């Protein structure tokens, strides 16, 4: 069975084009044309990836993304017709893993999808049951679950990938550029502030005081690292 993808856009020609292209790669593609339908399908199906347009009837894509994050950490790629940086960053603020601006090259979209699904499939097929415990922080690699002092924390796929990378390499400083390349899995054409948004969101979820972090520290002018 191939990976299952939900494509959400009110422009049926765009959905049709994406669906046709992804099915050539043996992906199983479902479609939704408004926010309500997208939420219903996301709740009732186990998708490996959701491609979600920002501008949707009934419920806009950002709110759909935010609501999905309440019950699932499925990777989400936002589609937007707007080019402003803030709109792109807002997509990430609401819990998206990536974004791509319309009009887009289908090959670029497929490259991003493949990068995400490679990580999804690697986790599902892995047999190494690793667990990290650091000062009240517990990371279960196989189940991709995170706990702070025994209480589970809900992370997005990218947030987990970033935390896993940091915690597995304590003391190593990662530049924003290297994080984009490692976590996103390709030469990311977007703004490097994407990394700052994800680090801030991650700190808000795992740190007692995000402004004085215990786990993820900043090396000014260089990047970020996990305190060993």
Image (cartoon, helix red, strand yellow):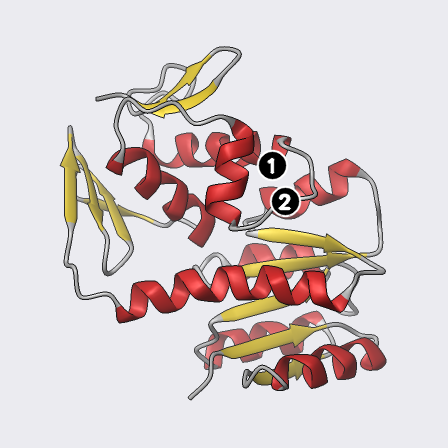
Instruction: Give the structural element (helix, strand or loop) at label 2.
Output: loop
Q: Are marks 1 and 2 in contact (CB under 8 Å)?
A: yes
Dot 1 falls on a residue whose secondary structure is helix
Closer to the camera, 85 or 166? 166
Q: How many marks?
A: 2
Residue 200 visible in the snapshot: yes
Residue at x 58%, y 81% (from the top left corner): 25
State the residue in front, 159 or 68: 159
Give the residue at x 49% y 30%.
200
184 relative to 171, above or below: below
Q: Residue furthest bottom?
A: 1
Q: Quadrant of the N terminus?
A: bottom left
What is the CA distance from the residue labelled 1 to the residue labelled 2?
Answer: 10 Å
How far across and how far down the image is residue 21, in percent?
Answer: 69, 80
- Residue at 40% across, 41% down: 162
| In-image side of 125 versus 92 (left or right) | left
Estimate the x, y position of residue 139 in percent, counting from the top left.
Answer: 22, 45
Question: Can you tell which quarter of the image residue 226 is in?
Answer: top left
Q: Which residue is mark 1?
A: 194
Measuring from the top left, give residue 191's x and y in whole percent. Answer: 68, 35
Query: Is 24 drawn above or below residue 136 in the view shown?
Result: below
Label 2: how many residues lie within 10 Å, few (<14), some (14-19) or many (20+)?
some
- In the picture, measured across the screen, residue 14 lies left or right of residue 100, that is right
Residue bearing mark 2: 188
């Amino acid at each position: 069975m191939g990976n299952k993808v939900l494509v959400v856009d009110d422009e049926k020609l765009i959905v049709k084009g994406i669906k046709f292209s992804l099915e050539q790669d043996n992906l199983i593609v479902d479609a939704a044309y408004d926010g309500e339908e997208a939420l219903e399908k996301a709740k009732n199906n186990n998708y490996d990836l959701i491609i979600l347009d920002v501008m949707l009837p009934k419920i806009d894509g950002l709110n759909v993304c935010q609501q999905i994050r309440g019950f699932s950490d499925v990777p989400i790629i936002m589609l937007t017709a707007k080019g402003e940086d803030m709109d792109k960053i807002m997509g990430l603020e609401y819990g998206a893993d990536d974004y791509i601006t319309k009009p887009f090259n289908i090959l670029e979209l497929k490259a991003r999808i493949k990068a995400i699904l490679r990580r999804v499939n690697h986790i599902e097929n892995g047999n190494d049951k690793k667990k990290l415990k650091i000062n009240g922080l517990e990371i279960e690699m196989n189940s991709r679950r995170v706990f702070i002092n025994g209480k589970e924390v809900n992370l997005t796929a990218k947030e987990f990938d970033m935390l896993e990378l940091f915690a597995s390499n304590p003391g190593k400083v990662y530049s924003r550029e290297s994080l984009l390349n490692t976590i996103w899995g390709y030469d990311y054409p977007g703004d490097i502030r994407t990394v700052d948004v994800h680090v801030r969101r991650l700190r808000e979820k795992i740190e007692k005081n995000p402004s004085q972090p215990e786990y993820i520290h900043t090396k000014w002018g260089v990047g970020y690292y996990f305190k060993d």
